[in-house]
Image: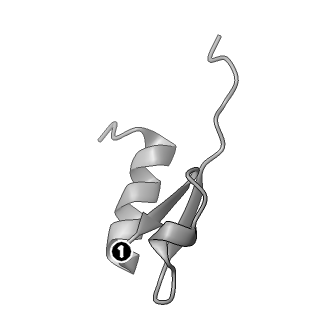
């Protein structure tokens, strides 16, 4: 059993204040990095 899945929240783009984001939000610096990070979270880096 995989157990309970954890939800993930991401923010990306200009204007996000890292200090104002809740702890559960991961700030991503740019779109290519965001795509890589989200892909890694979804597929677990199994390439």
Position of residue 17 in the picture relative to residue 1 (left or right): left
Determine the residue positioned at 39% across, 57% down: 37
Q: Position of residue 28 (x, y in %)?
A: 41, 68
Q: Quadrant of residue 43?
A: top left
Residue 32: image quadrant is: bottom left
Q: Residue at x 41, y 38 (%)?
A: 44
In this image, 4 relative to 29: left or right?
A: right
Q: Quadrant of the C terminus?
A: top left
Q: Is residue 36 above or below residue 20?
A: above
Q: Nearer the viewer, residue 20 or 4?
A: 20
The residue carrying pointer 1 sits among few (fewer than 14), some (14 to 19) or many (20 or more) residues within 10 Å by Cα, namely few
Most extreme residue toward the bottom is 14
Establish if 31 lies above or below 1. Answer: below
Q: Which residue is mark 1?
A: 29
- Tell me if 8 is positioned left or right of 29 in this view: right
Horizontal and vertical percent position of residue 23? 55, 52
In this rendered view, identify the residue nearer to me: 1 or 7. 7
């Amino acid at each position: 059993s995989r157990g309970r899945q954890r939800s993930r929240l991401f923010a990306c783009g200009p204007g996000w204040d890292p200090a104002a984001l809740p702890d559960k939000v991961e700030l991503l610096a740019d779109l290519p990095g965001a795509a890589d990070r989200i892909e890694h979270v979804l597929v677990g880096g199994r390439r």
